[in-house]
Image (tube, rainbow, N blue to C red):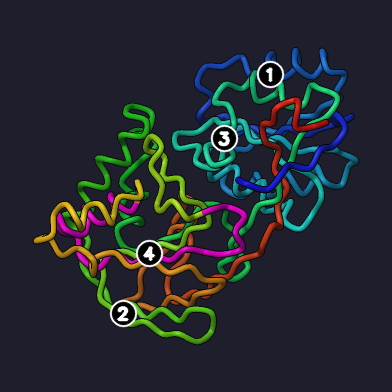
Amino acid sequence: MPDPPTFRSRPRRVHVIINPAPLKRLPLLSILNDAFRAAGIAWDVSLTHATGDGLRLAREALTREIDAMIVYGGDGTVMEVASALVGLEVPLLILAGGTGNLVAAEMRLPSQVEKCLDLLEGEKFATRSIDVGMMGETPFLLRLGCGIEVGVVQDATRELKNQWGKWAYVFAGIKQLQETPEADYRLTMDGGRVVEATGVACVVANVGTVGVGKLTLAPSVAANDGQLDVFLLKKANIEGILQLASKMVGLDKFVEETVPRLDVSSQVTHWSVESVKIETEPVLDIQVDGDVIAETPQAIRILPRSLEVIVPFHSRDAN
């Protein structure tokens, strides 16, 4: 992210919310205790047990005086906790504890818990303001989608993720490419432009990270650009997948020049918007940050720079 970070003094008290499901056999409480004791930071901890606990526990923690919130878990847990902080000045530190950890990757946070906690142990720590997407009154940090993405989320079960990690999503994606039928989409963007098309997937992204190496949905997608990025995949065939893959690594022009006989320009369409309404025939389920929680039609908008997140920085940047 190009904007310079904002610096704050070391927190006096923090609250940690932990999803114990993907604990990865870490002695997490011991790690937290050692780090906070060394830094002189007071801390409390809460555990989630079911969907919705992250939001509830975060709201309870905000009734007490805290200088930062910390969450350990996957992207679903991160989103629940972040939902309580939208529009507030309490910053969020994300400890990657899930399978995808896309929000942590987007923030360039270390994958090791100890190194993440190091960000709070100096005299100052850095934060950045990022955008939050809103579907109705439901916030999201990553993206929402209907069509192929919903099937991938449903097929990538906890058992598969425990066994195969990120490959669970790859296997689920291959299956969905063979099974997902086309639907009729009507997209109303920024309250005016209307696009009607047939497709197999529609994605509305706040960040570009997809969780496979350094691949992104498109090089231009950023978490603090004040915009959402809408992608429509029109056909689940090799041309469409090539186009989507080339967009992920910024090689769409190269592919078109190198393989001129392969007309893929119409398979994946990309718009940058501040709001979009998605209508479909038939009605489709919608996944939001990894959980299937709604169905079409839905109105989506962006809340620019409405969440404070703790990020890495070089010591020279704080001078």
With respect to residue 270, does 150 lie above or below? above
Mark 4 or mark 1, earlier in chain: 1
* Viewer-proximal residue among 288 and 300: 300
Mark 4 or mark 2, earlier in chain: 4
Residue at label 4? 231
In the rendered structure, find residue 315 and report the number of the disc placed on it. none
Give left or right: position of 316 versus 205.
Answer: right
The residue carrying pointer 3 sits among few (fewer than 14), some (14 to 19) or many (20 or more) residues within 10 Å by Cα, namely few
- Secondary structure beneath dot 4 equals strand
Q: Which residues are magenta?
A: 222-247
Residue at label 3? 108
Query: Where does the C terminus fall, quadrant-wise?
Result: top right
The CA distance from mark 3 to mark 2 is 39 Å
The CA distance from mark 4 to mark 2 is 18 Å
Disc 4 residue type (three-letter)? Phe
The CA distance from mark 1 to mark 2 is 49 Å
**Residue at horizontal 25 percent and vertical 56 percent from the top:** 243
- Secondary structure beneath dot 2 equals strand
Mark 3 or mark 2, earlier in chain: 3
- Percent x, y of residue 82: 67, 48
Mark 1 or mark 3, earlier in chain: 1
Disc 2 residue type (three-letter)? Glu
Residue at label 2? 281
Disc 3 residue type (three-letter)? Arg
Q: In the rendered structure, are the residues bearing label 1 and label 3 in contact, judged by CB atoms less than 8 Å apart? A: no
Q: Nearer the viewer, mark 1 or mark 3?
A: 3
- Percent x, y of residue 202: 36, 65
Q: In the rendered structure, are the residues bearing label 3 and label 4 in contact, judged by CB atoms less than 8 Å apart? A: no
